[in-house]
Image (cartoon, helix red, strand yellow):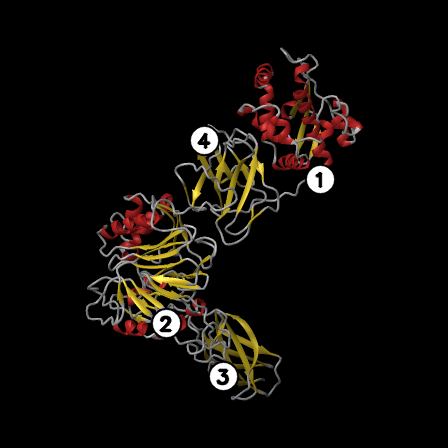
């Protein structure tokens, strides 16, 4: 049969061109072909009977779709087709109902060689969802070839003869599939596994949703090699891939066993969302990512996992981690910070990769060896940098994360970092060099992205939630570049804070998260971000202690809100910053068991704290967990919050008033911080049946409210809300002449209302 196709191609060189052009038709026509295929499930059976087609014929065999049973034999090929279509010469006219509008273009020559003399052509141009036979320029038409072969070729003749009519029937008789634009962004859905050479059954490709939200993939395309091979497959409108879930597509004779591309495309069938190129592939093996959505494995697997997770017994090699375990490894690198988290399916995230000294790579070498020991490979799904300090990321061209990637050869699926273009306080050589690297040669290796609040960016496997709770000051700091200001915000103020939850197990990690308003002797200011974040964190089981145990962090309200059972301090011996502070250690020991990587400041009495080197937390069920082998039980304690403002009884100074929250530790910085303070009223001026209230604007608020009363004590009634934060006056109209009115105001910040201002008064004219 393949010989016959070769002969046909040899004698009719224009036929391949015609079919290639067919494969590049507009998406609406592609939709019609697919609908025809759905209505005629016998497609694959018919073409399987033809034998394996040469690769250059793939677009034909995949494009035509199957045909109803009554069309399958040459003798009754016209059986189920409307009578008005039975003549090729009037087929197009029947579709439009106007025979005079169309011409049938006959070829100037005739077929040669083994093809019978009655081989003929008719030409039609396909535009949008209609079929117009050629009226002017046949060069712009799609020629569908209808031919007869010798008696040995009847089956082939019937299929190709009827293929053309089936397409016409689909275009004229079937309702058009609804058009849908592909709404995916790069990285949301990826090609996760491909089986190109089954010994029996269908080839298939598996897509994986990397996000925590169900995603509609309708209107996207699956294709093989660009500008060749089979026609792109249009994913039907409304097709959905569940959060962290799978979708598979079966194909016949589509992917090339000798090597091919698999591509996920946007609606234009050209823009690439994801792609996988593979080489020669044996039967019944698949190319796959490990874990799901992670890096591609270097070899195929003999155990394909169509529609299910690719996670194996180890993360990506023969490491110590085992499937089903959630593990949190606090790697002991002295003064620096580095935490490796591996989810129960093997997905991994490295939070910080610091160095004790800026011009050293010693800690990176320690980190790299430890990570390989756990994972069995040099592949990380995510890296999250909490902030740009050397002890959390290292120095470019020396150590830390740069060394892991550039020298040790680690691969990273995606790096998350804070938005330094919108929020910038004090800077350093560490920050400047990392900014240059991430926007230059490091972009292709780390795939950096700005961290956003929520659970949508990090997937550590089924059942695990990784919630970025706060980034860039948790909306409490004013956006802008303050790097040249006299006392700009500390880089610590912008640190990323996250909560991991698995079953009942909750874990907080926040780098050098700040918890006090104070000015450093080094020319920058800390701000209390902890207090405005703790209402979102609530109770946790394990607390990775902020800022190595500094007293600029870990304030009493924050710790009372989190109330951890275990606290873990990452700190180096003989710490030159005095970490951990005695007051913080005492505070932690009063509420939790304390584990430390090293002792830290020799002057600090660490009491019953365990000095353990690498501190490892493990749980297999989200309830029972261990810390360096010591057993604990995770709980979801019932805690009282009467006003439902997120702050628990005992932390909230007035748990019956939604607008009252714990005080900022050290106060609120009016220069850079959104402080919940009212505006300062400066006066009230009378007009005709009106009074204009005047005030000095509060530094940074969302809006104002104005209240009015007929006496100084009140009661006050709200008369104006949602006044713009830049406003400094408002006129109250429709008042009674000769009456005295009193006014107070409040500010609104993040949905909370400040206390009342003082009052002003005036008599309406």
> Which numbered tag is attached to residue 760?
3
Mark 4 to mark 2 CA distance (whole Å): 56 Å
Nearer mark to the viewer, of 2 and 3:
2
First along the sequence among labels 4 and 3 = 4
Q: Which residue is mark 4?
A: 281
Number of residues whose C-alpha sits closer than 10 Å to that of mark 2, classed few (under 14), some (14–19) or many (20 or more): many
Where 82 falls versus 412 (above or below)? above
Label 2, secondary structure: give it.
helix
**Spot occupied by residue 461 in the image (x, y as percentages of width and height):** 45, 53
Number of residues whose C-alpha sits closer than 10 Å to that of mark 4, classed few (under 14), some (14–19) or many (20 or more): some
Task: Work out whether residue 668 can be spotted.
Answer: no
Residue at 52 percent across and 89 percent down: it is 713
How many callouts does the rendering have?
A: 4
Where 419 falls versus 526 (above or below)? above
Number of residues whose C-alpha sits closer than 10 Å to that of mark 1, classed few (under 14), some (14–19) or many (20 or more): few
The quarter of the rendered structure image containing the N terminus is: top right
Mark 4 to mark 3 CA distance (whole Å): 82 Å
Q: Which residue is mark 1?
A: 175
Mark 2 to mark 1 CA distance (whole Å): 63 Å
Residue at 55 percent across and 82 percent down: it is 708
Mark 2 to mark 3 CA distance (whole Å): 41 Å
The one nearer the camera, 464 or 103, is 464
Nearer mark to the viewer, of 4 and 2:
4
First along the sequence among labels 1 and 4 = 1
Number of residues whose C-alpha sits closer than 10 Å to that of mark 3, classed few (under 14), some (14–19) or many (20 or more): many
Q: Which residue is mark 2?
A: 559
First along the sequence among labels 2 and 3 = 2
Where 385 falls versus 675 (above or below)? above
**Spot occupied by residue 438 in the image (x, y as percentages of width and height):** 35, 48
């Amino acid at each position: 049969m393949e010989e016959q196709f070769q002969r046909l191609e040899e004698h009719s060189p224009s036929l391949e061109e015609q079919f290639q052009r067919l494969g590049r038709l507009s998406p609406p026509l592609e939709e019609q072909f697919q609908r025809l295929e759905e209505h005629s499930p016998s497609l694959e059976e018919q073409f399987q009977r033809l034998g394996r087609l040469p690769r250059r014929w793939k677009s034909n065999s995949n494009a035509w779709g199957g045909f109803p049973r009554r069309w399958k034999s040459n003798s009754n090929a016209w059986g189920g087709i409307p009578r008005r279509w039975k003549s090729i010469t009037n087929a197009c006219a029947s579709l439009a109902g106007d025979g005079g509008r169309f011409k049938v273009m006959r070829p100037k020559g005739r077929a040669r060689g083994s093809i019978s003399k009655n081989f003929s052509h008719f030409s039609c141009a396909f535009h949008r969802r209609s079929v117009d036979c050629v009226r002017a320029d046949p060069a712009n038409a799609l020629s569908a070839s209808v031919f007869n072969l010798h008696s040995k070729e009847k089956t082939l003749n019937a299929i190709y003869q009827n293929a053309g009519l089936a397409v016409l029937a689909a275009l004229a008789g079937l309702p058009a599939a609804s058009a849908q634009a592909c709404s995916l962004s790069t990285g949301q859905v990826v090609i996760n596994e491909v089986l190109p050479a089954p010994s029996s059954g269908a080839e298939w490709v598996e897509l994986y949703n990397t996000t925590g939200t169900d995603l509609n993939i309708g209107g996207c395309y699956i294709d093989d090699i660009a500008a060749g091979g089979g026609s792109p497959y249009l994913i039907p409108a409304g097709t959905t891939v569940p959060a962290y879930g799978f979708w598979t597509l079966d194909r016949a004779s589509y992917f090339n066993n000798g090597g091919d591309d698999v591509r996920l495309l946007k609606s234009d069938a050209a823009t690439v969302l994801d792609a996988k190129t593979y080489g020669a592939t044996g039967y019944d093996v698949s190319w796959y990512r490990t874990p799901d959505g992670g890096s591609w494995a270097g070899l195929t697997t003999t155990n394909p996992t169509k529609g299910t997770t690719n996670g194996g017994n180890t993360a990506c090699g023969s490491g110590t981690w085992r499937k089903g375990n959630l593990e949190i490894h606090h790697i002991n690198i002295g003064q620096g910070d580095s935490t490796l988290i591996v989810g129960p399916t093997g997905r991994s995230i490295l939070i910080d990769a610091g160095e004790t000294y800026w011009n050293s790579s010693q800690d990176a070498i320690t980190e790299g060896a430890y990570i390989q020991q756990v994972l069995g490979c040099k592949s990380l799904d995510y890296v999250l940098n909490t902030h740009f300090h050397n002890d959390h990321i290292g120095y470019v061209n020396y150590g830390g994360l740069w060394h892991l990637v550039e020298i040790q050869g680690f691969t990273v699926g995606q790096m998350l970092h804070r938005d330094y273009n919108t929020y910038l306080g004090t800077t350093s050589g560490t920050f400047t060099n990392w900014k240059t690297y991430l926007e230059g040669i490091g972009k292709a290796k780390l795939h950096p992205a700005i961290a956003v609040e929520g659970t949508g960016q990090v997937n550590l496997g089924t059942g695990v939630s990784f919630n970025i709770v706060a980034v860039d000051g948790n909306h409490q700091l004013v956006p802008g570049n303050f790097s040249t200001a006299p006392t700009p915000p500390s880089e610590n103020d912008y640190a990323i804070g996250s909560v991991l939850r698995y079953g009942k197990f909750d874990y907080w990690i926040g780098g050098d998260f700040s918890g006090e308003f104070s000015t450093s002797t080094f020319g920058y200011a800390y701000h209390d971000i902890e207090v405005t974040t703790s209402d979102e964190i609530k109770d946790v089981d394990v607390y990775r202690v902020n800022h190595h145990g500094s007293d600029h962090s870990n304030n009493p309200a924050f710790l009372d809100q989190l109330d951890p059972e275990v606290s873990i301090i990452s700190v180096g011996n003989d710490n030159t910053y005095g970490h951990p502070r005695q007051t913080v250690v005492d505070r932690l020991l009063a509420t939790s068991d304390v584990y430390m990587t090293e002792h830290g400041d020799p002057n600090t009495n660490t009491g019953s704290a365990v000095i353990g080197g690498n501190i490892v937390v493990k749980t297999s069920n989200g309830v029972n967990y261990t810390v360096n082998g010591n057993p604990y039980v995770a709980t979801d304690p019932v805690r009282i919050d009467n006003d439902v403002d997120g702050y628990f009884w005992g932390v909230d100074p007035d748990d019956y008033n939604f607008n009252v929250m714990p005080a900022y530790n050290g106060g609120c910085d009016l220069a850079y911080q959104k402080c919940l303070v009212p505006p300062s009223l400066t006066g009230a001026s009378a007009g005709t049946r009106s009074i204009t209230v005047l005030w000095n604007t509060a530094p940074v608020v969302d809006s104002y409210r104005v209240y009015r009363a007929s006496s100084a004590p009140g009661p006050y009634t709200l008369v104006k809300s949602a006044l713009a934060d830049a406003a400094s006056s408002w006129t109250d109209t429709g008042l009674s002449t000769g009456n005295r009115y009193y006014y107070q105001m409040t500010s609104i910040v993040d949905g909370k209302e400040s206390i009342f201002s003082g009052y002003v008064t005036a008599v309406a004219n």
